[in-house]
Amino acid sequence: MSSTHQYAERAGNEALSVNFPGNFIANQGTADIAITTHGSDWYWAVTAVMAVSTFGFIGLSYSKPRTHRVFHYITAAITMVASIAYYSMASNLGWTPITVEFVRSAGTVAGSAREIFYVRYIDWVITTPLLLMDLLLTSGLPWPTVLYTILIDEVMIITGLCGALTYSTYKWGYWTFGMAAMFWIGYVLIFEARKHAYALGSDIGKTFLLCGTWTTFLWFLYPVAWGVSEGGNVIAPDSEAVFYGILDLCAKPVFGALLLWGHRNIDPDRLGLRIRDSAETGLAAAEKGHPSGTHEPVTNGATAATNGNTTSTSETV
């Protein structure tokens, strides 16, 4: 073998050579249904898109004052976490072998143990609540509804992971729990949050309708991907990579671009997000002629009235 050919091999994708699916791991198992170099290459491509999107969203945040960057930060955090997860999967790390329930004869899915990427679920358990935060903060829903919906989302993701790690037919029980959670989230997005968003203004309503409908449609495709990959062992791990990768690209970078475009002229105050910046407050006080280090009292939306020695404060929430 020529030195040039050897160098070309070293310069290529060596992730599967270093982290070979047949290597023994902590639980002394192997996976004979696993990604190939083609799947790894695809994961690397998605990693790059997620990373570039992160820098793009952070860069866009500097076009806004710090009090208006909350959606930029949340959206950048989503793609940042996803880029780390996809780096792990491209490197063929963050997986465990699970005995398949349905043994297939087709060459790409033939075998007894399938490579299950648990790192994908670590990604989702962090990023899907952030996605919901983007949407539910846009709608201006009350915090109890936001927090409860995020809890249901965590149930959905964790039951998906439990099902993926179960080799018997009981995995479909977890899938059913996850679907029930997803239907609840879909109800909140399609009905409650949409109506609340339109009550805040037509521009807010249109932004939520676009991003909320997009997300709901995509999220209902994830159980299909789960059913033909981790669940039913119907498609090869490389095809699984493409299926989930396209969904994640649409649900994260594309979603983020649509959301931030919709928010370009929306003041967070209209959504009930009254965010204060001490540096800007100090600058405003200096411009009004107040001595350095002294500011007008901040009431956080409260108005105070005095009557003799009695002070009453009424606060608007």
Image (spheres, rainbow, N blue to C red):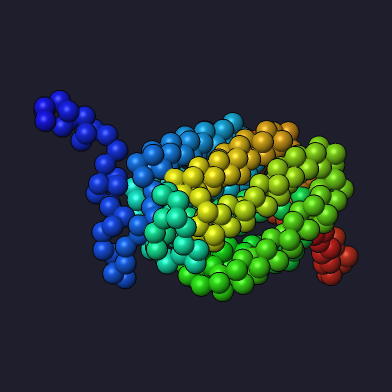
Quick check: can you spot residue 129? yes
Residue 108 location (% of width, % of height): 42, 49
Q: In this image, 279 relative to 51: left or right?
A: right
Query: In the rendering, at what x and y percent does residue 109 appear?
Result: 44, 53
Quarter of the image with the C terminus is bottom right
Q: Residue at x 27, y 34 (%)?
A: 12
Q: Viewer-proximal residue, 282 or 54? A: 54
Where 187 sits versus 72, above or below? below
In what quadrant of the picture does the N terminus appear?
top left
Residue at (42, 65) in percent of width and height: 98
For the image shown, how many numbered marks are present on the structure?
0
Is residue 73 something that shows in the picture? no
Is 67 located above or below residue 122 in the figure? above
The image quadrant of residue 266 is top right
Q: Position of residue 290 (x, y in %)?
A: 65, 43
The reply, left or right, for residue 99 in relation to residue 191 is left
Q: Name the one closer to the observer, 209 or 299.
A: 209
